Image (cartoon, helix red, strand yellow):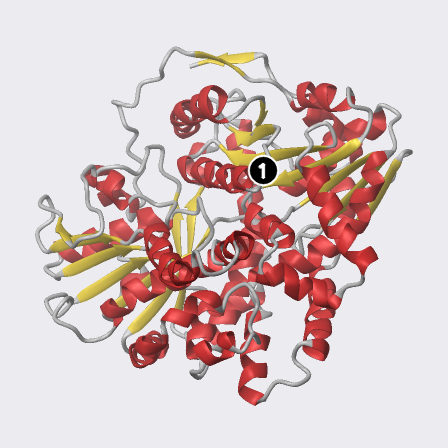
Amino acid sequence: MADPKFLDQPPRFLFFTGKGGVGKTSLACASAITLADAGRRVLLVSTDPASNVGQVFGMTIGNTITAISAVPGLAALEIDPQAAAQIYRDQIVNPVRGVLPDTVVKGIEEQLSGACTTEIAAFDEFTALLVDSALTADYDHIIFDTAPTGHTIRLLQLPGAWSDFLAEGKGDASCLGPLAGLEKQRAQYKAAVDALADSQRTRLVLVARAQQATLREVARTHEELAAIGLTKQFLVINGLFPQAETAQDPLAAAIFQREQNVLAAIPEVLNQLPCDHIVLKPFNLVGLTALRKLLVDELPLDSENKSSHHAIPFPSLSNLTDDIVKDGCGLIMLMGKGGVGKTTLAAAIAVNLAHRGLPVHLTTSDPAANLSETLSGVMDNLQVDRIDPYVETDRYRQRVLETKGAHLDAQGRALLEEDLRSPCTEEIAVFQAFSRIIREAGKKFVVMDTAPTGHTLLLLDATGAYHREVAKQMDRHSIAHYTTPMMQLKNPKQTKILLVTLAETTPVLEAVNLQVDLRRAGIEPWAWIINNSIAATTVRSPLLCQRASNEIADIEAVSTTHAKRYAVLPLLKEEPIGIQKLLELSKSNQASIKH
């Protein structure tokens, strides 16, 4: 292909953003190499805890600017957002340690353990890179692997008085805590946010795959960031299946057609953006040779990527369901990042249980999910409904504003309103609705698509400030619905958490991080499901054969290291829509595949 549109006359700052597994890091690295090869001086910055720029380049980088010796003009920096967040937690918690009761300190620590704190702390780290400074004066372009969300930018756009707001007890909520220590850098934040909103200086590259759910999520990101001034946006649809690979392989042909159908129905707001299509590559995007091939259309097969000869057992979803049935009833929660197929798998498990004559309640809070479309029919023993996260969150926000916000001044109310836009707020509001359903799991199976994170569960169970804030709004009977579900979630006889992932490095790493998060809350995931595996099917396309071979290492890591039990589901020619196909999905698999 010719030079991609997103690299045409690039401004100084380029941000690559998108969900895990869509290829942000690879595209950011390939773009940095392209610009450096053209004679520009480039700094590549990663703030994504799931990405590893150093691994991609085959060298150690870390939290200092490091020259990439094999690419003249290119340097890289990996900001560790977890380390940055820990520094902020220590700054806020250490002064009260030993002064306040241990239970209160633990509550404050949990408040500051969420994604919002991590993102704000990381933003603080790279703010210096967005303003004129000696640190970045030598670079023509600074490329960021991951951009801050609209929520974080809005928090930093709001006027000062964070410390007073918190000190007066008005902000006992999930995201304001880390900002208590940031007041002194307010001027630098303003300069950084101004740079982000300046289209002459900043370009935002939205990275997606040709999947309906992914494109809907990207459309939401586009609108949210455009609304706060980040208007210079480009769309990249990565990993498109090439038509040339479809001739001899029915699965390849089906994948190609499925993607073309998704592209034909792309959300209207994205149609207005300059767009590049990047063809799917057969090789792993590690090393300079691979990265230099990413932005070209040719498909050179990697002759060195030989198939290994391991026989890996690939248990079916039905094997997991057999074990689930043994306890007679309980809560089944499917968790994982967007785009991995949680809704379909939740429906498949529910249908399988109902088919065995067991009463089942299937529910979701995913705004992108359409359970009725996935099921495409009704069946005995199966009750289906959907919790609307927007309705539940709005109801929760209104209740907080009417109680806690009633006596705040305009500035305090603005801070509280922004805090209530946090992703944590939505999870808490939805969990209130879920808590009503969870009680049913004592007498039937309840299958839940999209679950709260370990951070949110700990917030709900905390004895610190957030729990006190919740308690103020609820009577004794309602509070019981918070603590009782937590006890149930920790009991594997009553609750089974299924982590859903793909056989790719980034989604597996994200699932590992989620498992750590849940364990911190005292909840042990019961099983893993690897969805849409090419290795678990039969293919003839050279591209698919090579990608199937690439999956083996990730499947082995899940089966031997991360999961106590697992299932591997093959990539299918047709979407599993309808009760019959969902039943077939839960039973599909070969016992093992040799590669």
Q: Residues within 10 Å of mark 1 (few under 14, many from 20)?
A: some
Q: Quadrant of the C terminus?
A: top left
Q: Position of residue 190 (x, y in %)?
A: 34, 80
The quadrant in which residue 448 appears is top right
Above-or-below relation of 163 to 441: below
- Residue 479 horizontal/vertical position (percent): 76, 56
Q: Which of the pair 174/433 is nearer the observer?
A: 174
* Quadrant of res 545: top left
Left or right for 293, reference 517: left
Q: Is residue 543 above or below residue 372?
A: above
The residue where tag 1 is placed is 522
Q: Is residue 579 left or right of residue 588?
A: right
Can residue 9 be seen in this snapshot?
Answer: no
Outermost residue toward the bottom?
410
Q: How many marks?
A: 1
- Mark 1 lies on a secondary structure that is loop
Residue 492 visible at all: yes
Residue at 75% across, 45% down: 484
Residue farthest along the right direction in this orientation: 380
Image position of 153 with respect to 66: above or below:
below
Q: Please state if 85 lies on the left or on the right of 65 as rendered.
A: right
The three-letter amino acid code for the residue at tag 1 is: Gly
Task: In this rendered view, identify the residue nearer to me: 475 or 559.
Answer: 475
Residue at image location 66% in from the left, 21% down from the top: 588
Q: Residue 216 at what x, y percent from top left?
A: 57, 58
Q: Nearer the viewer, residue 323 or 319?
A: 323
**Looking at the image, which residue sits at the far front?**
99
Judged left or right of residue 356, residue 424 is: left
Q: Position of residue 186 (x, y in %)?
A: 34, 79
